[in-house]
Image (cartoon, helix red, strand yellow):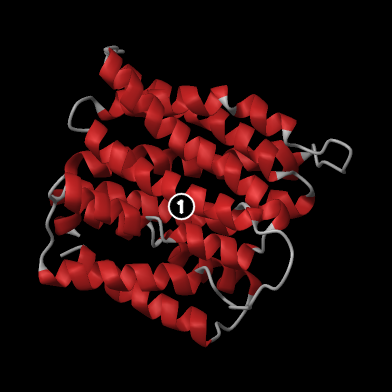
Amino acid sequence: MKQIFKQPWLFYALITTLFWGVWGAFIEIPEKAGFPPTLGYVIWALTMVPCATYVLHKMNWKVDKDLKSILLGSSVGLLGAGGQLILFQALKSGPAFIVFPIISLYPVLTIFLSLLLLHEKANRKQWVGILLALIAMFLLSNPQINPIQGGSTQWLYLSILVFVMWGLQAWVMKFANTHMQAESIFLYMTITALILAPVAVRMTNFNAFIEWGWKGPYLTFFIQILNAIGALTLVYALRYGKAIIVVPLTGLAPVITVMLSLLIYAVVPGRVLLAGLISASIAMLLLAE
């Protein structure tokens, strides 16, 4: 436990992993109740505001306003939020059990870019942890692996695009931390998320039933605040830690999602999920070295 507090990157990375894991386990509740994920995106963008306000207040509202900071911060936000909107489109025609495994491997791109352009390094144990983390991400997002035959492949290209955008976002976030304050990065992420909110509204089918009660926007707000806080602590984790280690570690949030889902629904994990959980657990220990 002392090791966690002595290493700021590990502390913030574990918060992101925990919060995103819990978020993933409960976000389907409002969606199953009839509150569309596109409107969930709008709620998420709004939950970013109090988080940004809090950290900027602590920094006495000292925002990086030079052109490079604006471009870097906005790029991080557009890559992340834009990727989310493209994901919605991909899921309209594509199978989730293939879309999510493709996207979940975005840390591979982040690792490659960080090695090539940031010249980051890891020890042998951490490399084994990175490899196990990538395996675990694939297994946990692939509870069943089935072939797809026929139909349009547009969803495949969209999935690959999201993979590239999110992998690039994590790298840009790390690069931006070398030039500007983490709080400023998060502010620009918030602004871009809000700018894209009308796009999410236009993607919503208002002719279908929408839950406007407690299980709709209100419950979504409390669930999405976990997502927003996780995004903020990820920025801090990448300020202090290496992208090739932080990103695979936070990418193991599905471990918590799966474990909570198994407990909530009293389901016994199959071989694939069990292998993913074991791989992820070992990876966490090795990456925290």
The image shows residue 153 at horizontal and vertical percentages of 65, 59
Q: Can residue 285 be seen?
A: no
Q: Residue at x 55, y 82 (%)?
A: 269
Q: Quadrant of the C terminus?
A: bottom left
Q: Which residue is mark 1?
A: 163
Indicate the quadrant where residue 250 lies.
bottom left
Residue found 21% across the figure and 47% down from its top: 9
In the depicted view, which residue is nearer to us: 205 or 262?
A: 205
Q: Position of residue 245 (x, y in %)?
A: 23, 57
Crowding at label 1, few (<14), some or many (≥20) Cα neighbours within 10 Å?
many
Q: Nearer the viewer, residue 70 or 148?
A: 148
Q: Is residue 80 rendered to the left or right of residue 232?
A: right
Q: Hey, which quadrant is residue 170 in on the image?
A: top left
Would residue 183 appear left or right of 123 to someone viewing this image? right
Q: Is residue 159 visible?
A: yes
Image spot of residue 54 (x, y percent) = 38, 24
Asked if residue 177 is positioned above or below residue 128 in the image, the reply reads above
Tell me: 142 left or right of 163: right
The image shows residue 221, relative to residue 34, as above or below, that is: above
Q: Quadrant of the N terminus?
A: bottom left
**Residue 180 place in picture, x, y as percent:** 22, 24
Quarter of the image where one finds residue 117: top left
Query: In the picture provided, is 104 more to the left or to the right than 16?
Result: right
Total number of numbered discs in the rendering:
1
- In this view, the residue in front, 197 or 164, is 164
Which residue corresponds to the image point at 65% horizontal and 53% vertical from the top-left?
154
Q: Mark 1: which amino acid?
A: Phe
The residue positioned 23% from the left and 55% from the top of the image is: 244
**Helix, strand or loop under label 1:** helix
